[in-house]
Image (cartoon, rainbow, N blue to C red):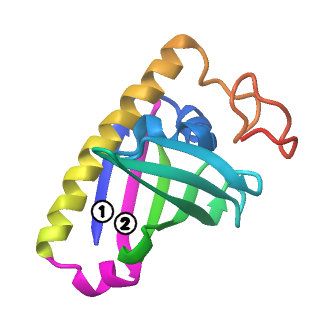
Amino acid sequence: MAVRHCLIKTRPQTVWAVLADGTRYADWVVGTASSRPVRGAWPQEGAAIGYEVRIGPVRLSNETVVRRCEEGSALELEAKAGPLGTARIAIELKRWGEHCLVLVDEHPLRGAGGRLHNAGTEALIQLRHRAMLARLARLCEAEERAGRGDAAEPGVRAGAGAPGDGHA
């Protein structure tokens, strides 16, 4: 299993505000060119975002579904990757003094990805996570500096409407 952590120099509320915005995944998820809500109210259980991966002229679309959400502290996702199957991605946020410790645990769940999983693919996932967590840290720290990371309520980003009104 690919487990990686990163200390982000911001409050957990700021990190959660970014995770709770399904339109921002392409800003920090390596390999994702765009994301958009497709079902439900992200990040509530059962909600889904569609995403696109671009490899040269090829565009691949799929979706990621929320399987578990503990608002402000844990988000578990099932990312669909077509013929490769699906992966479980668990993101946990822990207050660490004034900062946020983010833990990401990813492993193949179904399909060819699970059957072909080996030390080589594990190393690639680790490299991807390193870059992904660095992007997330830069984004969250910039949000905090800009004053946009101060959500009035857990799970509601600054400037967003009330939970359930169609905003992520």
State left or right for residue 19 relative to residue 157: left
Residue toward you, 25 or 140: 25
Residue toward you, 105 or 23: 23
- Label 1, secondary structure: give it: strand
**Does residue 96 show up?**
no
First reached walking from the N terminus: tag 1 or tag 2: 1
What x and y, as percent, mark residue 129? 29, 51
In the rendered image, the vertical position of residue 76 relative to residue 107, given as above or below: above
> What's under tag 1, amino acid-wise?
Val
The residues colored magenta run 96-118
In the rendered image, the vertical position of residue 27 relative to residue 120, given as above or below: above
State left or right for residue 77 relative to residue 6: right
Q: Where does label 2 land, which residue? A: 106
Label 1: few (<14), some or many (≥20) within 10 Å? some
**Does residue 7 show up?**
yes
The image quadrant where one finds the N terminus is bottom left
Query: For the view shown, which residue lies furthest in the top direction?
Result: 146
**Distance between the alpha carbons at the discs numbered 1 and 2:** 6 Å
Q: Where does label 1 land, which residue? A: 3
What x and y, as percent, mark residue 154? 71, 40
What x and y, as percent, mark residue 99? 44, 33
Q: Is residue 106 magenta?
A: yes
Residue plotted at (83% across, 31% down): 161
In the rendered image, the vertical position of residue 141 relative to residue 44, given as above or below: above
Indicate which disc residue 133 carries: none
Q: Are marks 1 and 2 in contact (CB under 8 Å)?
A: yes
What x and y, as percent, mark residue 81? 42, 67
Label 2: few (<14), some or many (≥20) within 10 Å? many
State left or right for residue 58 relative to residue 27: left
Query: For the view shown, which residue lies furthest in the bottom direction?
Result: 115
Rendered image quadrant of residue 125: bottom left
